[in-house]
């Protein structure tokens, strides 16, 4: 594991941007409103993939009991808390230090036991930690070296483990929607949240995942409907936000 | 990190129930059954003991259940318990009438034969529905009844809601739901204000037995002082909802049964032969009351607690059951995603789904009533012609029939 175990694939400029936003994580009408709006479809995808991979019944009480899950870039815990509520044993990791106390305080208020750590995927991989599920949501477009980062994610999985990775496509539409639309017009995200050149197409991501030693098994789009003002999952439209599932052989 | 003792305490075990419902009338039990079916632990609080609520005496009250409502009752296991006591409503005849002149020649006629789903609705007496709900709750795993208990206080914190009962007992849950009617104490304690107005009308509700069979036909006569609805019950009986001016209703309330019958007969007409009263007479002042919000911190309002509307089209219970279908769907989806069911973002989905729909319905039944509770000859002519036009256009009429059957709009899964 020494081959890729660098702890510095996170771009320091990116971390400070998120630190400034950390306290606002749980404000439903604050800066993270778009994430809160998107969270139901993210959770739909995540829960269904985990249920299918590990043969769990989502209508049961605590269906993810016994599953060890890591959320990389956990932020304020928007995904960790639902996963813990469903019974998973959850570790939330974030490279932005200020997110950790925010997430911890909120989990305590919610009566949930979640292990939040200020660390990176690379450091955890180096320490030999392993999980059944790794959630890697809206992170890969912010890292300096995506291949090294995804290789660390693969090392964090047990054999047969599931890796769910979402990001933003790179094309004129995604530029218009994610940067001009979300950051400038709607002011959903602070200006400068995203750097378009770092966006990755679905084919490029499948290629990166394969090179990192994982087997891609699924990809879907998250589509925002401005009339219904809500997100949905699409089989075909991966033109802006999309999510992938891959497994460690 | 994974101290099992801590996990047990941490993850919700301290709460008595997942969800507490205040109100054990009709909406409360229907919601409790739908939620228990989705795997929630539900507590139902009601001021009356169960035996009192089960009292089988006929009190004259009955509900027109739309087809969509029947589907929801079937989905939660209640319909089979009331089916033998349900009168299918096969046709609805709406007539503009003026006392002493008989019905005008223009009328609207809605026939279930125009839609493929079956009868537009069913008339079920209050007593049968109540008993069916209570029996179903007793049989349902996951429902605890706190009967003969009233809520004296409710407090909310980040993890949940705590309710204090008059007995001194406290109960904790993730979410509190007010099904406690148009004077909802649950809403009041949460500081939710209401908007509304009185119509200056009072509904007189009773049941009559008549000589001739009604053929499953519901009648609505629009009289100058307010509408008179004659709704078919099982056997040769009908339920009456007669809206009158407050003054006139007060006079009627003071009358003996025999005197009241003499007043009712000319309005009712003779098409069903001789009539006599069955059960008690009820008086309900008509007012519209909309909660300014259907949700608050860890709280949701359902049925009349959210929207008490004019009972002109029998839509009160049907609208409540739609709330229930929507709320149960929102909460069970949230649960399977691992979301906090009491969080504002989850409850906002319920409010978004229901608030527009119910406000529209409440205001349109209001406008409908204002248009018809009027004896201006010009208005009378316009509405007569309007009715004639509706009646002459099958497409428009089918639309009305589907609306009456509750089949329009964004239907909750339990109603499809």
Image (cartoon, helix red, strand yellow):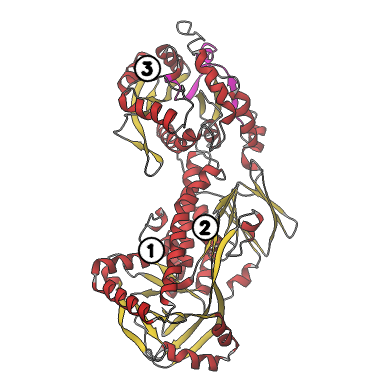
Picture residue at 60% right of the left edge, 24% below the top:
A100
Q: Which residue is mark 1?
A: B406
Q: Disc 1 vs disc 2: Cβ atoms closer than 8 Å?
A: no
Q: In the image, is residue B101 above or below residue A132? A: below
The subunit carrying tag 2 is B
- Residue A49 point in image, percent of width and height: 40, 33
Is label 1 on the same chain as label 2?
Answer: yes
For discs 3 and 1, the disc positioned in front in the rendered view: 3
Subunit ID for the residue under disc 3: A
Q: Which residue is mark 2?
A: B31
**Quarter of the image holding residue B322?**
bottom left
Residue A114 lies in the magenta stretch: yes
Does dot 1 land on a helix, a strand or a loop? loop
Tell me the residue at 49%/43% (across/down): B334
Q: In 3D space, how far apart are the residues under numbered discs 3 and 1 (Cα atoms)?
A: 52 Å
- In magenta stretch: residue A196: no
Looking at the rendered structure, the secondary structure element under dot 3 is helix
In the foreground, B226 or B230: B226
Q: Residues within 10 Å of mark 3 (few under 14, many from 20)?
A: few
Residue B335 visible to an observer of this rendering: yes
Quadrant placement of the N terminus of chain B: top right
Q: Which residue is mark 3?
A: A197
Q: Identify which residue is drawn at 44% across, 14% down.
A: A149
Q: Position of residue B53 (x, y in %)?
A: 60, 70
Q: Are marks 2 and 3 on the same chain?
A: no
In this view, the residue in front, B394 or B331, is B394
Earlier residue among tags 1 and 2: 2
Pinpoint the chain carrying mark 1.
Answer: B
Q: Position of residue B226 (x, y in %)?
A: 46, 79
Label 2 Cα crowd, 10 Å radius (few <14 / some 14-19 / many 20+) = many
């Amino acid at each position: 594991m020494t081959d890729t175990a660098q702890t510095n694939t996170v771009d320091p400029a990116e971390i400070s941007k998120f630190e400034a936003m950390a306290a606002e994580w749980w404000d439903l009408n604050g800066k993270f409103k778009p994430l809160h709006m998107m969270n139901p479809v993210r959770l739909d995808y995540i829960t269904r993939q985990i249920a299918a991979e590990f043969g769990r019944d989502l209508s049961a009480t605590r269906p993810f009991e016994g599953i060890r899950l890591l959320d990389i870039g956990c932020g304020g815990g928007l995904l960790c808390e639902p996963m813990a509520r469903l019974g998973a044993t959850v570790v939330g990791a974030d490279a932005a230090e200020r997110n950790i106390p925010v997430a911890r305080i909120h989990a305590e208020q919610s009566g949930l036991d979640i292990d939040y750590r200020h660390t990176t995927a690379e450091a955890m991989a180096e320490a030999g930690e392993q999980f059944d599920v790794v959630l890697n949501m809206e992170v890969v477009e912010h890292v300096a070296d995506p291949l090294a980062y995804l290789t660390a994610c693969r090392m964090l999985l047990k054999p047969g483990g599931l890796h769910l990775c979402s990001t933003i496509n790179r094309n004129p539409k995604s530029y218009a929607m994610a940067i001009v639309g979300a950051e400038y017009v709607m002011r959903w995200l602070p200006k400068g949240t995203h750097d378009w050149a770092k966006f990755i197409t679905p084919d490029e991501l499948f290629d990166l995942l394969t090179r990192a030693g994982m087997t891609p098994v699924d990809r879907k789009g998250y589509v925002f409907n401005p009339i219904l003002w809500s997100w949905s999952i699409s089989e075909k439209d991966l033109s802006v936000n999309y999510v992938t599932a891959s497994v460690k052989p | 990190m994974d101290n099992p003792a801590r996990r047990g305490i941490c993850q919700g075990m301290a709460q008595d129930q997942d969800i507490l419902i205040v109100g054990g009338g009709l909406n409360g039990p229907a919601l409790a059954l739908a939620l228990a079916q989705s795997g929630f632990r539900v507590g139902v609080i009601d001021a009356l003991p169960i035996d009192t609520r089960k009292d089988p005496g006929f009190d004259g009250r009955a509900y027109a259940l739309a087809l969509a409502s029947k589907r929801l009752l079937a989905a939660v296991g209640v319909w089979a318990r009331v089916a033998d006591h349900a009168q299918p409503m096969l046709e609805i005849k709406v007539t503009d009438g003026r006392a002493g002149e008989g019905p005008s020649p223009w009328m609207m006629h809605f026939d279930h034969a125009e839609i493929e789903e079956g009868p537009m609705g069913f008339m079920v007496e209050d007593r049968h529905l109540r008993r069916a709900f209570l029996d179903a709750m007793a049989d349902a795993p996951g429902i605890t009844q706190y009967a003969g208990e009233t809520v004296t206080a409710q407090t909310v914190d980040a993890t949940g809601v705590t309710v204090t009962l008059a007995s001194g007992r406290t109960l904790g849950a993730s979410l509190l739901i007010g099904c406690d009617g148009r004077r909802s104490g649950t809403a009041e304690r949460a500081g939710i204000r209401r908007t509304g107005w009185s119509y200056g009308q009072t509904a007189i509700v009773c049941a009559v037995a008549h000589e001739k069979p009604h053929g499953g036909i519901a009648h609505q006569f629009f009289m100058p002082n307010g509408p008179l609805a004659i709704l078919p019950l099982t056997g040769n009986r009908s339920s009456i909802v007669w809206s009158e001016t407050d003054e006139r209703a007060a006079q009627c309330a003071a009358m003996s049964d025999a005197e009241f019958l003499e007043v009712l007969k000319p309005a009712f007409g003779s098409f069903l032969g001789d009539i006599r009263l069955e059960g008690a007479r009820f008086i309900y002042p008509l007012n519209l009351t909309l909660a300014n919000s259907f949700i608050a911190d860890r709280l949701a309002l359902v049925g009349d607690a959210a929207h008490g509307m004019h009972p002109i089209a029998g839509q009160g219970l049907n609208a409540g059951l739609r709330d229930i279908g929507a709320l149960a769907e929102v909460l069970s989806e949230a649960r399977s995603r691992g979301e906090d069911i009491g969080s504002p973002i989850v409850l906002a989905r319920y409010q978004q789904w229901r608030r527009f729909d119910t406000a529209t319905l409440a205001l349109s039944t209001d406008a409908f009533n204002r248009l018809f509770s009027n004896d201006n000859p010009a208005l009378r002519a316009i509405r007569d012609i309007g009715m004639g036009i509706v009646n002459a256009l099958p497409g428009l009429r089918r639309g009305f029939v589907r609306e009456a059957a509750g089949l329009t709009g964004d239907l909750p899964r339990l109603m499809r």
